[in-house]
Amino acid sequence: MTKSVRWVLLILWIGIIFVLTGYPKLSVPRIDKFPADKIYHFVAFFILGLCELRLFKWRDYFILGCSVALLAEFQQFFVPGRDVELFDILAGISGLLICYLIFRKRIGKEG
């Protein structure tokens, strides 16, 4: 995959994150007293991490990923029916971190 395709996928995925987190009154199912939205945040930011892996060094990877997590959550402050939750931010950052820990050695050897 070329670098320009990776950039396009990254920008599209960031756009998708902001559209989904900016959707008013988005309801998600609960799984036995565990809010499933944390799983969605984790998965969305894990995928963001995959999009970022070959484009950035580790520091820039986390700066961009954490910035998107913070801004996406902050955006919800202005969206009716949505709440800002620290655990959503933590779930997103966890997705980035786990993605990085799983794939960093593989990317380092290939890239």
Image (cartoon, rainbow, N blue to C red):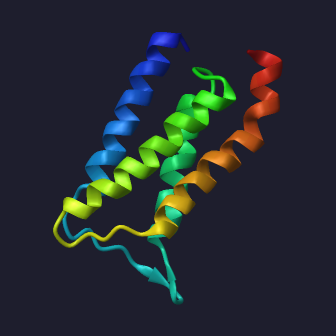
Nearest the camera: 83 or 29?
83
In x, y percent, where is residue 38? 50, 67
Classify 58 as above or below 4: below
Q: What residue appears at the point 36 percent right and 48 percent down from the top-left corner?
A: 71
Q: Pinpoint residue 73: horizontal percent, then vertical percent.
A: 37, 57
Q: Residue at x 35, y 51 (%)?
A: 72
Give the residue at x 44% y 82%.
30
Residue 92 lies, in percent from the top left, at 53, 55
* Quadrant of the rendered image containing residue 94: bottom right
Percent from the top left, x then y, of residue 43?
53, 54
Q: Seen in the image, is 95 located left or right of residue 12?
A: right
4 relative to 99 in the view: left or right: left
Q: Quadrant of the C terminus?
A: top right
Label tally: 0
Task: Give the residue at the far left of this rendering.
Answer: 80
Kindly give the residue lying farthest to the bottom in the view shown: 33
Q: Quadrant of the N terminus?
A: top right
In this rendering, the answer to whether 87 lies above or below 106 is below
Q: Is residue 46 above or below residue 4?
A: below
Q: Work out whether 21 lies above or below 1.
A: below
Q: What residue do we see at 52% from left, 12% from top?
A: 3
